[in-house]
Image (spheres, rainbow, N blue to C red):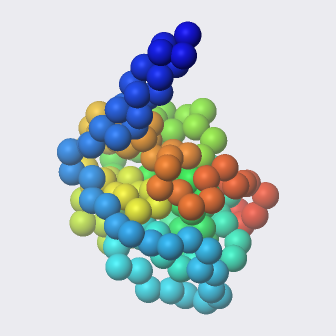
């Protein structure tokens, strides 16, 4: 029994550490709460200082404030963003992708250099199409993933507005 559990743990660890082609990683410390508008190194951000309130997870049809969403990333959320002019079929595919996932945020994002981007605390993947299989792999790895400093903290009951 002990050997079987050891093998299971090793298999799960191997799955979780599997790299996803195209993912960029960054190093940020958690807990840096600040007020006001902040500047981020990545576009959209993938960690760093953030507002003391987090963005409620869910699907939004308007852009969000980076400062609130970054706090949600700290809690283990994955933020999928898309260009506001992305066609309706691709937006629908993204909505289907996040459906039933409690630690995801989906919203348009102005100024993206690719049509779709997925961001988690310390990780980001940019893709050309909503049906890129790497998006699901990214969600599976980073939603409530090990990189989130406050994994498991709430993703609801805070800020629910848009810009």
Report the residue at 72% width, 54% height from top: 154
Q: Nearer the viewer, residue 116 or 154?
A: 154
The quadrant of the rendering that contains the N terminus is top right
Q: At which x and y percent is residue 112? A: 31, 66
Q: At which x and y percent is residue 78? A: 49, 52
Report the residue at 49% width, 49% height from top: 146
Report the residue at 71% width, 66% height from top: 159
- Looking at the image, residue 37 sits to the left or right of residue 40; the answer is right
Q: At which x and y percent is residue 76? A: 56, 53
Total labels: the figure holds: 0
- Looking at the image, residue 135 sits to the left or right of residue 61; the answer is left
Q: Nearer the viewer, residue 28 or 61?
A: 28
Above or below for 125 versus 5: below
Above or below for 64 versus 157: below
Q: Is residue 49 visible?
A: yes
Q: Nearer the viewer, residue 73 or 110?
A: 73
Q: Identify the image quadrant of residue 72.
A: bottom right
Which residue is farthest bottom?
36
Report the residue at 51% width, 39% height from top: 98
Q: Identify the image quadrant of residue 162.
A: bottom right
Q: At which x and y percent is residue 80? A: 44, 52
Which residue is farthest right?
157
Which residue is farthest top?
1
Q: Nearer the viewer, residue 126 or 12?
A: 12
Q: Identify the image quadrant of residue 69.
A: bottom right
The quadrant of the rendering that contains the C terminus is bottom right
Q: Is residue 57 visible?
A: no
């Amino acid at each position: 029994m002990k050997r079987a559990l050891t093998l299971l743990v090793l298999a799960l660890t191997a799955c979780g550490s599997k790299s996803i082609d195209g993912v960029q990683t960054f190093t940020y410390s958690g807990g840096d709460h600040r007020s006001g508008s902040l500047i981020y190194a990545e576009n959209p951000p993938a960690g760093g200082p953030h507002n003391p309130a987090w963005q409620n997870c869910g699907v939004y049809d308007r852009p969000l404030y980076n400062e609130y969403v970054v706090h949600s990333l700290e809690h283990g959320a994955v933020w999928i963003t898309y260009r506001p002019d992305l066609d309706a079929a691709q937006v629908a595919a993204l909505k289907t992708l996040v459906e039933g996932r409690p630690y995801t945020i989906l919203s348009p994002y102005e100024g993206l250099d690719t049509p779709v981007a997925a961001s988690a605390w310390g990780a980001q993947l940019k893709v050309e199409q909503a049906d890129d299989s790497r998006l699901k792999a990214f969600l599976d790895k980073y939603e409530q993933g090990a990189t989130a400093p406050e994994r498991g903290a709430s993703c609801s009951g805070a800020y629910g507005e848009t810009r």
